[in-house]
Amino acid sequence: MVYNPLLSIITPSYNQSNFIEQNIRSVKQQTEDLNEEVEHIVVDGGSTDSTIDILEQYEDDYKLRWVSEPDNGQSHAINKGIKMARGEWLGWQNSDDYYLEGSFEALRNAIQSSRQIDVLYGDVLIVDEDGAVIDRRYMTKPSKFVQRYWSLFARNQATFFHRNCFKKLNGLNETLEYTMDAELFWQILNTDVDVTHVPRFLGAFRIQEDAKTAGKLSNDHIEERKKIYGEPWYEAVVPQRALQTAARGLKLWYLLTEQRWEPIKYNLVNSIQG
């Protein structure tokens, strides 16, 4: 009998033994809550630390499958995991990040509604290497302008995709090293898919020294962004800071129309302190 779970979680990994166990536990615990309707696929790039020992420790405890072999980067590993996945829904969680309690239940509750959903996303906690919360990312309705000039409309740490959505998008762009998530969400904004936001924290994004996106953007990162978003004519005459301020204001306006007072207060306080 073929096992077809509701949800497949794909985790790309390479030498993240300090953090992958928390990632695994965040999936395992919720797998138990959902009566094993979840499978976890770890695509390891040939780690030389104790990652494999950790995977072997947990592989019999829940629906965990893993492979460890050289790959062509993070996007390639994720696409490989998508091909292995059997679930109707897909999630992508990097090995140093993790899901928050109740995130899978939030997905199940949403898809049990009568309306069609292709992408479900929630809010994200930003944590340090020790797991302490250092920031919050409150998401709101999708906006091309906000994504281009302020922040992604969603984060993979708190997003679930219907399998058919990934088919439409042809997976992740394997030529991108830093901005594959931005390119994926930009595609979604430009594709006819149903996108739904859940106003609660679903995942945690860890800031750590070894992370590719930690610190100041590299020239390669900036060039990748240009490939995704292009360079509209008005950027030559409107200062970048003005565009960023307008995008941030638009996001605050969306929060206001949604009557989400806590995120509004949080963003205003940060703006004053910043």
Image (spheres, helix red, strand yellow):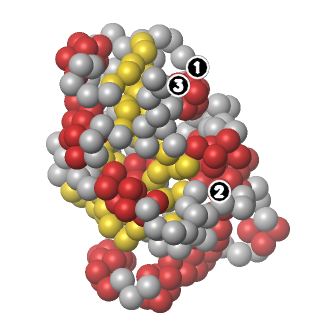
Q: CA distance from mark 1 to mark 3?
A: 17 Å
Task: Please state if 112 lies on the left or on the right of 236 as rendered.
Answer: left
Between 99 and 239, the one lying in front of the other is: 99
Of helix, strand and loop, which one carries label 3? helix
| In-image side of 47 versus 186 (left or right) | left
Picture disc at residue 84: 3
Q: Quadrant of the N terminus?
A: top left
**Tag 3: amino acid:** Met
Mark with earlier residue (3, 2): 3
Vertical relation: 255 (above or below) 228: below
Residue 43: percent from left, percent from top: 44, 23
Tell me the amino acid under the disc marked 2: Ile
Quadrant location of residue 234? Answer: bottom right
Mark 2 or 1: in front is 2
Residue at the image point whose x is 22% and y is 46% from the top: 33
Rounded to the nearest whole Å, what is the CA distance between mark 2 and mark 1? 24 Å
In this rendering, would 153 be left or right of 56?
right
Is 45 placed above or below 90 here? above
Per the image, the residue denoted by label 2 is 188
Residue 108: in sight, yes or no?
yes
